[in-house]
Amino acid sequence: NRHLYSWAAAISYALGSRWGLSGEVSGQTQPGAADTAQFLWALSYNLSHRAVLDAGSAWGLRAASPDTTVFAGLTLLFK
């Protein structure tokens, strides 16, 4: 079966004018494969109205999910 179903629920909170905190629960299910699910949190910092740095980590909630993941990124807005 080639159908893959993904789900997610997230919340974010401003920690002032430049900082933010986010949390998310997400997962995937596919017939014939083990389900995955994870919880992640991230901290973001607005460098400007066009650039945001973020970093965080995720923890697997199911046996088929990775135990721990660490990430960091940069988001740029182009007009």
Image (cartoon, grey):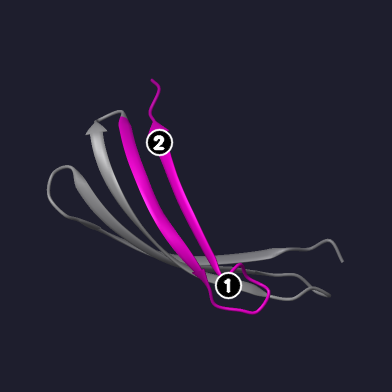
- Categorize mark 1 by other alpha carbons within 10 Å: few (<14), some (14-19), many (20+): many
Quarter of the image where the C terminus is located: top left
Amino acid type, mark 2? Leu
Q: Residue at x 62, y 64 (%)?
A: 6
- Which one is nearer the viewer's eye here, 36 or 67? 67
* Magenta highlight range: 51-79
**Magenta stretch contains residue 9:** no
Amino acid type, mark 1? Ala
Mark carried by residue 10: none
Q: Residue 22 location in percent, x, y?
A: 33, 59
Residue underneath mark 1: 37
Q: Residue at x 16, y 54 (%)?
A: 15
For numbered disc 2, what is the local secondary structure? strand
Left or right: where 79 falls relative to 27: left
Q: Residue at x 87, y 66 (%)?
A: 1
Residue underneath mark 2: 74
- Calculate the distance from the C-alpha at mark 1 to the C-alpha at mark 2: 24 Å
- Up/down of 5 relative to 48, above or below: below
Classify residue 77 by image quadrant: top left
Q: Main secondary structure of the magenta part?
A: strand
**Magenta stretch contains residue 62:** yes
